[in-house]
Image (cartoon, rainbow, N blue to C red):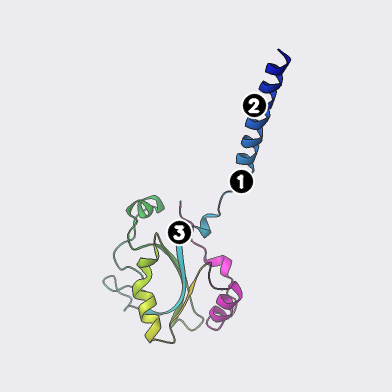
Amino acid sequence: MRALRLSWIAVVLVVVSFAVNGWAQQRVDSRNTHERLLCVVPMVGAGTSEDPRRPQFVPVAPMPETASEAVSSRQGILAYAFQESDDGQWALVEFVAANRQAFKEILDEAKVKPDLKTFEKGKAKRSDIEKEFRKHKKDFDLDSLGVRLP
């Protein structure tokens, strides 16, 4: 009888220890999910409704209404955020996609255009990104650019 009681106590302790470990895990910040590419790209567009002024590579077609719709489609660039440079000629952009393949056009063009700068989030150093971005926007803070997706 005493052995049965000890085995039940052991089982309860094991279950509780696993439950505590599950509760202790922290969620990943939604600014660090998906594939992310930080870029310095030129501003393009005439500023009309047919050709709006925007960063190069930003989809011209309307973006989905909600982040959930964007994530459910999982094609191409899901979201982006940008700030114009101090002179208005450049955009400091964070592109978000489900997979790296969505950035192929941007990365290919960056190979032949040295003024187009790209940084893969998680691979590039934060200090390198901010140093390059501050060449275009004096008071730039990388935390002000984060895009959150579900």
The location of residue 124, given as percent across then percent down, is 54, 73
Decide: few, some or many residues near mark 2? Use Cα within 10 Å; few <14, some 14-19, many ≥20. Answer: few
**In the image, what residue occupies the spot 48% across and 84% down?**
87
The location of residue 101, given as percent across then percent down, is 36, 67
* Residue 125 lies in the magenta stretch: yes
Q: Where is the N terminus found, in terms of image quarters?
A: top right
Q: Is residue 3 left or right of residue 81?
A: right
- Residue that protrudes farthest toward the left in the picture: 50
Q: Are marks 3 and 2 in contact (CB under 8 Å)?
A: no
Q: Give me the C-alpha separation between circle 2 and circle 1.
A: 22 Å
Which of the marked residues, 1 or 3, is nearer the chain's N terminus? 1
Q: Is residue 79 left or right of residue 51?
A: right
Q: Amino acid at mark 3?
A: His
Dot in front, 3 or 2:
2
Quadrant in which residue 5 is drawn = top right
Decide: few, some or many residues near mark 3? Use Cα within 10 Å; few <14, some 14-19, many ≥20. Answer: some
**Count of marks placed on residues:** 3
**Does the rendering let one see residue 50?**
yes
| Residue 107 against residue 74 in the figure, above or below | below
Q: Which label number is shown at residue 34?
A: 3
Q: What secondary structure is found at the residue carrying circle 3? A: loop
The residue under label 2 is 11
Q: Are marks 2 and 1 in contact (CB under 8 Å)?
A: no
Q: Are marks 1 and 3 in contact (CB under 8 Å)?
A: no
Quadrant in which residue 114 is drawn = bottom left
Which contiguous range is marked in magenta?
122-150
Q: What secondary structure is found at the residue carrying circle 1? A: loop
Q: Amino acid at mark 2?
A: Val
Decide: few, some or many residues near mark 1? Use Cα within 10 Å; few <14, some 14-19, many ≥20. Answer: few
The residue under label 1 is 25
| Residue 69 against residue 114 in the figure, above or below | above
